[in-house]
Structure formats: structure tokens, C-alpha cells
Image (cartoon, rainbow, N blue to C red):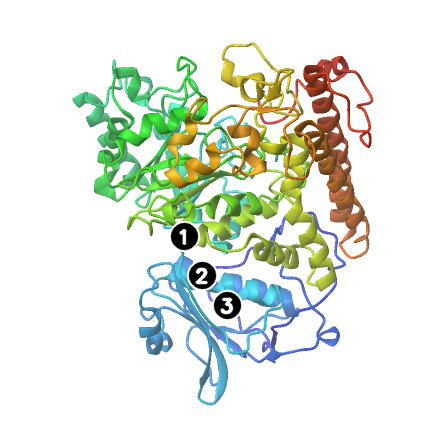
């Protein structure tokens, strides 16, 4: 467990003899289980290191508030870990001043930097090397304590990754205001689409028992700039808003507050009926309006910095305003009015679809929301999934991005890998996030990227947000596997600045998590950067989507049909027959291309221009269609399936070559999961090839091995206890 430290004044420890800004070392010899995530703060033997060294002497830091003490504690923890000896922490400077942290209000030694921190807002910070009284020093300055804490984590990241402090001058502020984890956690500790054990929140023992993991969770989030947590599932239980459970949420809010994290709750729209005994939840009903105002007052009396509500309404059977003939805007504004006096927000999900609607499911959210642009109150964000269907291995960006200029749109990414192999497949999601964020909506001409939409800069919105469906549970690794920690980490870094490079983020994560040795970093980053594309290849190549088994979404199921609704089947999406395959969403088909700006629509509509990786998303294509490689579509499809398996085998070989360079427990754990991934990638390849060959009757390419079993074998495989769905 990460060591917890006293929040009181610190005893006079020995002098910190130096911080090393270039820390190159092989993996630590101690046994590790992944609990420390990327904050390992591993001791480095100075005798084995060379390069730039800077004497910091003592640390001068205020300790009057909980956040100030959190910053001091983190510095002490990190510096002690790096050097094996603790720094001397002071409130007032000794003769030798070396590291000064604080705000102009908390420390007179920060006053000279007041002008330099202008424009950084409440969460930004300045980190720079200075000369004071002829001595080298570092300053971490900010307007607010939370900015100082973010600056401390930034400094520790530089030290962990071996970055030189020569001439250091960093001014950082988040580009997005609300950076939130959505926990799909139920009150019984079951986590929907969770692959890391039970919920971290032990509702049974809260508020009396405050598990130390709650604080370590807050530290990890603060280290990457996440500032909000929705505690409960979007498929909400009204009891989450009851007095009993609100008192439990208070305990978590109190623990998170020093780390800049606000708590939010998913609100069940029918709560006035289920908790309040009302006959209706109609947003126009005065009694309903009064109930929500009083509920908000109750919550804010307990949690003054409560963030607000997240709502899933009129989707997948959830209650909502449409039950009463009202719009999504009327429903969202009902709750927005209730939290407005307290400074709260409402995050209203745009993930809506109904089986009664006969048209293309990919069109439904746009059709329901675009006409409401400008009707939402200014403390409402519409939370939009990255793609128009449902967190698939690859989707085009959602057409709502860029289509609602008068409404702040909040990105919703999935960190937990519901459709990407759960926790056992090594799939780094940074490239997926980057692909979506850099996509150009052309809403206001070229350069109108999705990142600019969600950060608010494209339309000048002051309110902005991004959410990630959390992959965190009570597993010792937090995320169910060592490499899935990278997806939590990448989400946080891109939430802070959506213009960053997924490769650079992976490089930092590997250096902090496994080793700073350049060859180890290069090898592991190489594995990670191609892993998402490999998963697309062995699962859903060339724009195919939603081919997973029914319900739990574990394993291949391209044959899935029937059931309660067509858009829960695979055949609805791939529409394969002996003539061709793919969903025609062109202007001649469902017309979903028309929901994009004209330059984007023209590209997607033209089979000669559409990117091949989205070909079958937008076009129905004959099996003999000639691809860019020169192969017919069928041959290319099989090639991609096989290529995905080969990439996993290459990752296995790379990881095996790192034996002895990564501590044995974690190396063995990852190696075992790669074996699972390799077997399941082969399963995906063989089952999919067998199915599509049964449809088109075509021979396999000469260089491709046939599936070892007939199609019926794969169709008969069942996984009734796959995690993440059901009890």
C-alpha cells in the first residue's frame, strides 16, 4: 500500500542532499503488485547515475489547509522514495532556500511570482528554476492550493521520468474544466462493465470505516488532474439520493476534497416517485420541481462542494422526461434549476436509443438532441459518447460534436474495456482517444477538431467537460491488470490537455510504472502503440462493429440475431450475405452521413474517399471490391484478422525479452494475460472467418490457415459467467 503520512507538522529530518533530475535505473528489485500505479517513487542509487544534479536543500511549504498538507506529504513521500532519505520540511524558510511552494496568500515567498501566475486560473501552476540569494531554487506557485498540488505532482513526474531540471520553466493550466470519472458502481458493490473486482466503495461500512484506499484513489486521480468522481451507476438506484446513502457520500467527499475532487451522483429521474412518494416525475409539475430543489438543498447542506448530477434518461428502459411528453432539455433544466443556487451542474447523457424507432441506431442521438441546441440552461452539459453507437473498437466521431454550437458538449470515453477484451487484453486506449480528439468536425471550417469542441474554445463556452467510464475496482492492481492502469492514466492526461500525444503519455507511464531504461521504455511503448489497432484487426476490422456475444460482450458473436431488439444483434450491423457486407449509411442508404458537416459527409459518402478503417461502417461493399492493398475485400478482411493475432504474438515475444528487466511478479502477471489474449485473438479470428465464409461461400486466400473447427463449434461456446454483466 502507498504509505500514508501524518498531516501535522513534520519532525526535523536529515538534510536532503540532492534531487537527481536524470534518474536512469533498471527496474526496482522489490516485489510489486501494481498497487502503487505510476506513483512508485523508486529509490535510485546515486552511484549508478550520472548527469545533471541539482541541490534543492530544504523544502519550504505551508501546512495550514488539508490541501497544503497533501502537497507537503506528497513531496515528502516522493523525495524520500527517490533518495532513501527524507527532506526537511519547513513552513518558514531556513537560511538555505531550495524548494518554495505555495500561493501568494499562503506564503510571502511566493508574492514575487504573482504576476507570472496571472491567467492560470484556480487549477494552474508555475514551476520554474530561479536564483534566490545566489542559490539555485525551484518554485511551485499557484493561485490556489490545488494548483500547488498539481505542480507538485508535475515535478515528481519530471523526476520519475528522468527529465532534466535545467532551465525549468513550466506554466500549466487545464484546458477542460470538469475532468470526471464515471463509476458504473451499484450499491451492492457490483460494477457494471467492470473487470477489476467489486466496487471500491464499501457502502456497508461507510461512513464509519474510511478505507485508506479511498485516499490513495484520490491521490492517483490528483496526480493526473482528474477533479471529479460520479460515485454510482448511470443506471441509477434512487436510494443513492436517500439520506442514508448521502451520509456515506459525505465521507468520500471529505476524503477527496483535499485532492481537488468533487463528488457527483447519478440521479434516477423517477426519484420523486420512488423516494418522495409523488405520483409523477413530470418536469413541469410544481411538486416535482419543489422536490428536486429540496433534495439539492439537502445534498449541499451535507456536501457544500457537491458537483451535481449525471443523468441517463429515456435510454435502455431508464425513466425520463419523454415519459411525460417532455424533451431532454426540459428534463435537464429541471435538475439544473435545483442545483444552480449552489453552483452545481447537470451532465445529461446523449446516449439514447429506442427499439421502437425503426431507423439506423447510429442516427438516434443526433436526431433527438440537435434540435434542442440552445434550449439547455447554462449549467447543463450534454455528455456525448465518442462515437454514435457504443464504445466500439473503432467508430467515427459522434456527429453531435460540432452540431450543437450553443450547448457545451462533454466527451464520454470508456476506460473500462467493455468491447476490447476486458482487463486481460493489452489494449492501450491512448491512440483511440487521440484519434477521436484530433478528428476534424469542420463545424467552423478546417481545424474544428473534437478537442476544440469539448474544451469550449471552438464556440467560446466557459463550461467544459470530459468523462471517462472508470475501470477501477477493488483488485490490487486497481484496474484488473497492470496495463489497464495506462488507460486510466492516459484519460487523465488527455482530460487535462486533449492536444497531447498518446505516445508521449505512454512513454511517461512506462518510465514511471516499469523502468526508466531507454530500451525498456522503447520496447513497451512500441507494444502499446500498436495494441489498439491489433484489437481492431482481430475483432472488428475495416469498420465492422458490434460483433460481440450477446449481453456480456465477451468473445466473438457475428452470428447473433433474434432477441428483444434488432439493434442488440450483430447481424443488424454487418448485414452480410453472399453478395457483400457492411451497413449502408451513405446518402443512398440510412443517410447518417448527412449528420456530419458537408466536407466530412462527402468523404464518408464516397467509397473512393472514405478511410478504409471505416469502410464497412458507412458502405455495403461487394466481397470482390478491390482494396488499397490490391486484395479483394474478402482477402483483406481475412488478412486483417490474422494480422491482429500476429501482433499479439509479437507483443508476447517482446515482453518475454524483458524478463529480468521488469520485476518478476508483474512480468509473470502480464505474460499470463498475454497468453490469454493470444488465445482469445485466435478465437476471434477463427470464429469470424468461419462465420463470414459460411455466408459468402468464398475460398480462403492461399496463404491463410483455415479455422481448426467448424462454425457450429464456435457458435456452441458459451460464457455464462463472463464478468461485467449479470450477477
C-alpha separation, residue under disc 3 versus residue under disc 1: 23 Å
Question: Where does residue 306 sit, x and y in percent of width and height?
Answer: 33, 42
Q: Which circle marks residue 286 in the picture?
A: none
Q: Are marks 1 and 2 in contact (CB under 8 Å)?
A: yes
Q: Left or right: where does residue 490 sit relative to residue 272?
A: right
Q: Looking at the picture, how far across and down is residue 179, in whole percent?
A: 42, 47
Q: Sequence order check: which comes first, mark 1 or mark 2?
A: 2
Q: Is residue 482 visible?
A: no
The residue under the point 36% across, 50% down is 177
Query: Dot 2 lies on which element?
Result: helix
- 3 or 1: tag closer to the N-terminus: 3
Question: Residue at coordinates 44% horizontally, 21% vertically from top-left?
Answer: 360
Dot 3 and dot 1 residues touching (CB under 8 Å): no
Residue 285 percent location from the top left of the image: 19, 20
Looking at the picture, how far across and down is residue 92, in whole percent? Answer: 41, 77
Q: Nearer the viewer, mark 3 or mark 1?
A: 1
Q: Quadrant of residue 64?
A: bottom left
Classify 485 as above or below 630.
Answer: below
At label 3, counting other C-alpha atoms closer than 10 Å, the crowd grade (few under 14, some 14-19, many 20 or more) is some
Q: Nearer the viewer, mark 2 or mark 3?
A: 2
Q: Quadrant of residue 563?
A: top right
Tags 2 and 3 in contact by the CB under 8 Å rule?
A: no
Question: In this figure, which residue is indicated by the disc labeled 3?
Answer: 10
Q: CA distance from mark 2 to mark 3?
A: 18 Å
Horizontal side of residue 237 vs 619, given as left or right: left
> Which residue is rendered at x = 73% and y = 48% of the image?
666
Please identify the residue farthest to the bottom as the structure is shown: 134
Q: Residue furthest left?
A: 286
Task: Tell me if residue 184 comes above or below residue 698 in the rendering.
Answer: below
Q: Which residue is mark 2?
A: 149
Label disc, if present, on residue 260 of the rendered structure? 1
Amino acid at each position: 500500500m502507498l504509505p500514508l503520512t501524518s498531516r501535522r507538522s513534520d519532525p526535523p529530518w536529515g538534510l536532503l542532499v540532492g534531487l537527481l533530475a536524470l534518474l536512469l535505473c533498471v527496474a526496482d528489485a522489490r516485489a510489486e503488485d501494481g498497487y502503487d500505479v505510476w506513483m512508485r517513487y523508486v529509490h535510485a542509487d546515486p552511484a549508478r547515475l550520472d548527469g545533471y544534479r541539482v541541490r534543492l536543500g530544504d523544502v519550504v511549504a505551508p501546512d495550514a489547509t488539508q490541501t497544503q498538507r497533501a502537497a507537503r506529504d506528497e513531496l515528502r513521500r516522493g523525495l524520500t522514495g527517490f533518495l532513501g532519505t527524507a527532506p526537511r520540511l519547513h513552513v518558514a524558510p531556513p537560511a538555505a532556500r531550495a524548494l518554495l511552494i505555495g500561493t501568494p496568500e499562503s506564503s510571502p515567498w511566493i508574492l514575487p511570482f504573482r504576476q507570472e501566475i496571472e491567467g492560470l486560473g484556480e487549477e494552474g501552476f508555475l514551476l520554474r528554476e530561479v536564483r534566490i540569494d545566489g542559490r539555485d531554487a525551484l518554485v511551485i506557485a499557484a493561485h490556489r492550493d490545488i494548483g500547488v498540488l498539481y505542480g507538485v505532482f508535475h515535478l515528481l513526474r519530471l523526476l520519475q521520468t528522468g527529465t532534466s531540471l535545467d532551465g525549468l520553466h513550466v506554466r500549466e493550466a487545464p484546458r477542460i474544466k470538469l475532468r470526471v470519472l464515471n463509476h458504473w458502481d451499484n450499491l451492492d458493490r457490483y460494477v457494471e462493465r467492470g473487470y477489476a473486482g467489486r466496487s471500491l466503495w464499501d457502502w456497508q461500512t461507510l461512513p464509519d470505516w474510511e478505507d485508506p484506499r479511498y485516499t490513495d484513489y484520490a491521490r492517483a486521480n490528483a496526480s493526473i488532474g482528474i477533479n471529479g468522481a460520479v460515485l454510482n451507476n448511470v443506471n441509477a438506484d434512487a436510494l443513492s439520493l436517500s439520506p442514508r446513502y448521502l451520509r456515506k457520500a459525505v465521507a468520500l467527499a471529505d476524503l477527496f476534497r483535499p485532492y481537488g475532487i468533487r463528488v457527483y451522483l447519478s440521479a434516477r429521474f423517477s426519484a420523486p416517485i420512488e423516494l418522495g412518494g409523488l405520483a409523477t416525475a413530470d418536469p413541469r409539475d410544481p411538486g416535482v420541481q419543489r422536490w428536486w430543489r429540496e433534495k439539492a438543498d439537502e445534498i449541499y447542506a451535507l456536501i457544500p462542494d457537491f458537483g451535481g448530477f449525471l443523468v441517463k434518461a429515456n435510454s435502455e428502459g431508464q425513466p425520463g422526461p419523454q415519459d411525460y411528453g417532455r424533451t431532454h432539455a426540459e428534463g435537464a433544466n429541471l435538475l439544473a434549476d435545483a442545483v444552480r443556487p449552489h453552483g452545481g451542474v447537470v451532465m445529461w447523457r446523449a446516449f439514447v436509443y429506442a427499439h421502437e424507432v425503426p431507423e439506423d441506431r447510429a442516427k438516434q442521438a443526433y436526431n433527438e438532441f440537435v434540435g434542442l441546441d440552445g434550449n439547455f440552461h447554462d449549467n447543463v452539459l450534454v455528455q456525448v459518447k465518442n462515437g454514435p453507437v457504443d464504445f466500439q473498437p473503432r467508430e467515427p466521431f459522434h456527429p453531435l460534436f460540432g452540431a450543437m454550437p450553443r450547448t457545451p458538449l462533454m466527451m464520454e470515453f470508456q476506460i473500462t474495456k467493455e468491447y476490447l477484451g476486458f482487463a486481460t487484453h493489452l489494449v492501450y486506449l491512448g491512440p483511440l482517444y487521440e484519434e477521436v480528439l484530433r478528428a476534424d468536425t469542420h463545424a467552423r471550417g478546417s481545424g474544428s477538431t473534437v478537442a476544440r469542441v469539448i474544451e469550449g474554445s471552438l464556440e467560446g463556452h466557459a463550461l467544459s467537460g470530459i468523462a471517462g467510464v472508470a475501470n477501477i475496482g477493488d483488485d490490487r492492481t486497481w484496474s484488473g491488470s497492470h496495463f489497464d492502469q495506462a488507460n486510466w492514466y492516459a484519460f487523465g492526461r488527455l482530460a487535462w490537455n486533449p492536444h497531447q500525444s498518446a505516445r508521449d503519455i505512454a512513454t511517461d507511464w512506462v518510465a514511471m510504472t516499469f523502468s526508466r531504461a531507454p530500451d525498456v521504455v522503447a520496447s513497451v511503448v512500441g507494444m502499446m502503440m500498436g495494441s489498439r489497432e491489433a484489437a481492431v484487426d482481430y475483432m472488428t476490422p475495416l469498420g465492422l462493429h458490434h460483433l460481440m456475444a450477446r449481453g456480456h460482450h465477451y468473445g466473438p458473436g457475428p452470428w447473433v440475431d433474434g432477441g428483444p431488439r434488432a439493434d442488440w444483434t450483430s447481424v443488424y450491423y454487418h448485414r452480410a450475405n453472399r453478395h457483400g457486407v457492411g451497413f449502408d449509411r451513405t446518402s443512398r442508404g440510412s443517410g447518417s452521413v448527412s449528420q456530419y458537416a458537408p466536407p466530412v459527409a462527402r468523404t464518408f459518402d464516397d467509397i473512393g474517399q472514405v478511410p478504409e478503417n471505416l469502410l464497412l461502417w458507412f458502405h455495403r461493399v461487394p466481397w470482390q471490391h478491390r482494396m488499397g492493398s490490391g486484395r479483394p475485400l474478402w482477402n483483406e478482411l481475412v488478412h486483417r484478422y490474422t494480422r491482429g493475432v500476429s501482433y499479439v504474438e509479437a507483443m508476447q515475444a517482446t515482453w518475454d525479452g524483458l524478463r529480468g528487466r521488469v520485476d518478476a511478479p508483474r512480468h509473470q502477471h502480464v505474460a499470463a494475460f498475454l497468453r490469454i489474449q493470444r488465445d482469445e485473438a485466435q478465437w476471434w479470428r477463427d470464429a469470424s472467418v468461419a462465420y463470414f465464409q459460411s455466408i459468402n461461400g468464398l475460398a480462403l486466400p492461399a496463404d491463410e490457415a483455415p479455422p481448426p473447427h467448424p462454425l457450429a463449434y464456435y457458435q456452441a461456446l458459451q460464457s455464462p459467467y463472463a464478468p461485467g454483466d449479470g450477477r
